[in-house]
Amino acid sequence: MGKNERVQQEADHLIDELLKGNENPGLGSKNLFKDVSYLRGRNGARVFYRKTANGYEILGKADKANEQTVINILKKLYE
């Protein structure tokens, strides 16, 4: 998330909301591929996750600047 504390706080808030059962916090959730989805925040935060039998697994966090880099890494790992 780099040096932007606001984006980091937004990502943390998105995760908190997801863990409370809100599957569409912020600007909502979108499927990326297979079982990997992501949450989007208004300030540019992105949280990549997948649902598991025990809850949610957070796979990565990004901002708009490094979003594509994180997506490329996740595709190599999980697609």
Image (tube, grey):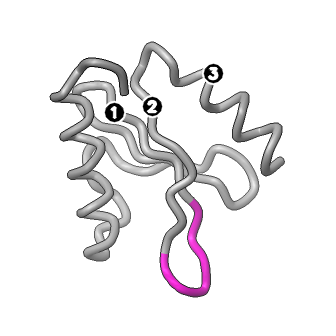
Spatial CA span between label 1 and label 2:
6 Å
Return the mark for residue 59: none
The answer to whether mark 3 and mark 2 are in CB contact below 8 A is: yes
Return the mark for residue 62: 2
The answer to whether mark 1 and mark 2 are in CB contact below 8 A is: yes
Horizontal and vertical percent for residue 63? 40, 25
Horizontal and vertical percent for residue 71? 65, 32
**Farthest residue in the top direction?**
65
Identify which amino acid the numbered label 3 is placed on: Thr
Horizontal and vertical percent for residue 57? 54, 65
Q: Residues within 10 Å of mark 2 (few under 14, many from 20)?
A: many
**Farthest residue in the front direction?**
3
Judge by depth and name the residue closer to the eye, 10 or 5. 5
Q: Is residue 53 magenta?
A: yes
Instruction: From this view, report whether residue 24 is shown above or below residue 68.
Output: below
- Left or right, 32 with respect to 41, comes to right
Q: Which residue carries the number 3 mark?
A: 69
What's the residue at 24%, 63% (across, down)?
17
N-term mark: 3 or 2: 2
Spatial CA span between label 3 and label 2:
9 Å
**Farthest residue in the bottom direction?**
53
Query: SS for tag 3?
Result: helix
Identify which amino acid the numbered label 2 is placed on: Ala
Query: SS for tag 1?
Result: loop
Q: Is residue 29 magenta?
A: no
N-term mark: 1 or 3: 1
N-term mark: 1 or 2: 1
Identify which amino acid the numbered label 1 is placed on: Ala
- Left or right, 6 with respect to 8, comes to left
Horizontal and vertical percent for residue 32? 64, 44
- Magenta extent: 50-55
Return the mark for residue 45: 1
